[in-house]
Image (cartoon, helix red, strand yellow):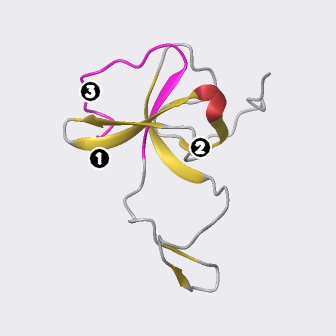
Amino acid sequence: MISSNERLPITMLTDRVLVELPSNDGERHSRAGILIPATAQVAKRLVWAEVVAVGPNVRAIQPGNKVLFSPEDRYEVEVQGEDYLILRERDIHAVASSTVETETGLYL
């Protein structure tokens, strides 16, 4: 994982967002504590990831935010031996951050 003090050797362009998926090997737990294996089929499940870098035209997302997106709307890339995903800002469905803003962040 890249810390916020380290600089990536790349610059994101336009509305692109670079995210890092948590390394949980696809397994997850239900609310009742039941382990759901990575091989279990789930239709159209959205996933959360942490934003590492954003392009200059990204308006509602900042590095450090958690974003919700569809795994089908992504491009994988390797940077310094680590795997990341590149998304477009419009493909992100929700943003979770520690700060609450007065605007909704929604736009069409």
Check residue 14 for magenta coloring. yes
Which label belongs to residue 7? 3
Q: Is 11 rendered above or below residue 7?
A: above
Is 9 on the left-hand or right-hand side of 76?
A: left
| Mark 2 neighbour class, 10 Å CA radius: few under 14, some 14 to 19, many 20 or more | some
Give the magenta range.
1-20
Residue 12, quarter of the rendered image: top left
User: How many callouts does the rendering have?
Assistant: 3
Q: Which type of secondary structure does the marked residue at label 3 adopt?
A: loop
Q: Quadrant of residue 78?
A: top left
As drawn, is 30 to the left or to the right of 101? left
Residue 101 x %, y %: 71, 33
Residue type, numbered disc 3 = Arg
The residue closer to the viewer here, 61 or 103, is 61
Mark seen at residue 1: 1
Kind of residue sitting beneath label 1: Met
How far across and how far down the image is residue 97, in percent? 59, 43
Say if mark 3 contacts mark 1, CB within 8 Å: no
Number of residues whose C-alpha sits closer than 10 Å to that of mark 3, classed few (under 14), some (14–19) or many (20 or more): few
Q: Is residue 68 above or below residue 77?
A: below
Instruction: Identify which residue is drawn at 57% across, 53% down.
Output: 47
- Which circle, 1 or 2, is nearer the viewer? 1
Q: As drawn, is 67 to the left or to the right of 102? A: left
**N-terminal label among 2 and 3:** 3
Q: Earlier in the sequence, mark 1 or mark 2?
A: 1
Q: Position of residue 70 (x, y in %)?
A: 61, 46
Element under label 2?
loop
Q: Earlier in the sequence, mark 3 or mark 1?
A: 1
Determine which residue is flagged by label 2. 97
Q: Residue furthest left?
A: 80
> Which of the 4 quarters of the picture holds residue 96?
top right
CA distance separating discs 2 and 3: 21 Å
